[in-house]
Image: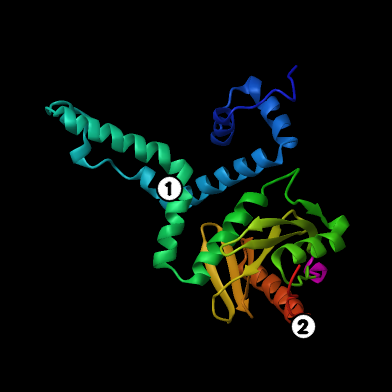
């Protein structure tokens, strides 16, 4: 037995994300997360950070260790104490900061090296990768309360949204959630097919120029991006690029035909 109200430490949350939590604490931590949305959001953000780092730098783990870092060779060297201290400090900074700041570091690099299209798409695919694997809590508001979902998200992002009807493609709305976007709040809708395949639509304000549908493959996900009137959209999915394109085209057509100017004020 465990006490659902017994506080869970930050160390336990990190261990839970890393898959290193003691088995006897697993149920307690999951119970804690089910009633503490702030910690659930933190865990989700850490998982997204880890996924971003793995997708961008994971190949480095399989590379051979350079000869200059051979352990036996290094052991034979005489290291001045200042060099040892500097190396220890560097190891601490790299190891301790990579998990926590890795995604932010990558984002800074993206801002300097990549276009708004790539930056925005990366944010959308991060959200896709994080939530499509969720079984119990993939969305905040379910499709059974779709009217409230659209009204709530529209108010939070500051313009009138529409959840496209994709049933002609065999996809039903699962629901949606509010997320932090590149330039403010972002709306996130999830759809699911009869075989369990999921697609998401991510949208937020953007200063990117208007553009037609554009592809971007990030890891195992395929994304289709477009921007119109200071709002950017990304449809994400896995597998057949043609199906992702069909979903994006259907969403684009419905959103474009029902566009409503943003309301000013509260």
Q: Are marks 1 and 2 in contact (CB under 8 Å)?
A: no
Colour pattern of the rendering: rainbow
Q: Residue at x 18, y 31 (%)?
A: 82
Label 1: element kind: helix
The C terminus, quarter of image? bottom right
Q: Which residues are magenta?
A: 165-170
For label 2, the residue is: 257
Left or right: where 234 falls relative to 93: right
Left or right: where 94 falls relative to 200: left
Height in image: 71 above or below 187? Answer: above
Magenta-colored stretch includes residue 136:
no
Height in image: 220 above or below 72? Answer: below
- Circle 1 residues within 10 Å: few <14, some 14–19, many ≥20: few
Please state the horizontal and vertical placement of residue 248, each as a whole percent of the image: 67, 72
Label 2: element kind: helix
Of all residues shown, which one is farthest toward the front? 265
For label 1, the residue is: 58
Distance, label 1 to label 2, CA atoms, is: 42 Å
Nearest the camera: 169 or 213? 213
Count the numbered circles shown. 2
Left or right: where 103 falls relative to 160: left
- The quadrant in which residue 68 appears is top left
- The quadrant in which residue 95 appears is top left
The N terminus, quarter of image? top right
Q: Residue at x 64, y 27 (%)?
A: 8
Q: Residue at x 74, y 36 (%)?
A: 34
Left or right: where 216 falls relative to 190: left
Q: Residue at x 76, y 51 (%)?
A: 140
Please state the horizontal and vertical placement of residue 147, each as a whole percent of the image: 86, 63
Sooner in the amino-acid sequence: mark 1 or mark 2: 1
């Amino acid at each position: 037995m465990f006490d659902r109200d017994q506080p869970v430490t930050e160390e336990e949350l990190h261990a839970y994300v890393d898959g290193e939590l003691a088995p006897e604490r697993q149920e307690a931590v999951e119970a804690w997360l089910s009633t503490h949305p702030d910690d659930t959001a933190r865990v989700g953000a850490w998982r997204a950070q880890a996924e971003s780092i793995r997708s961008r730098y994971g190949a480095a783990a399989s590379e051979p260790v350079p000869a200059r870092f051979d352990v036996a060779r290094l052991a034979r060297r005489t290291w001045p104490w200042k060099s040892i201290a500097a190396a220890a400090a560097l190891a601490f900074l790299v190891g301790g900061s990579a998990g926590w700041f890795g995604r932010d570091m990558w984002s800074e690099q993206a801002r300097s090296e990549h276009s708004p299209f790539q930056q925005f798409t990366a944010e959308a695919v991060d959200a896709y990768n994080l939530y499509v694997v969720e079984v119990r809590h993939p969305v905040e508001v379910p499709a059974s309360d779709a009217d409230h979902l659209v009204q709530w998200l529209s108010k939070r992002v500051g313009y009138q949204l529409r959840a496209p009807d994709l049933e002609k493609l065999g996809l039903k709305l699962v629901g949606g959630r509010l997320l932090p976007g590149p330039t403010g709040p972002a709306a996130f809708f999830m759809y699911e097919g009869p075989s369990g395949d999921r697609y998401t639509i991510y949208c937020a304000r953007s200063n990117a120029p208007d553009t037609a549908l554009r592809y971007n493959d990030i890891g195992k996900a395929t994304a289709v991006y477009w921007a119109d009137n200071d709002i950017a959209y990304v449809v994400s999915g896995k597998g057949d690029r043609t199906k992702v394109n069909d979903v994006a085209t259907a969403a684009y057509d419905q959103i474009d035909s029902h566009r409503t100017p943003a309301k000013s004020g509260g």
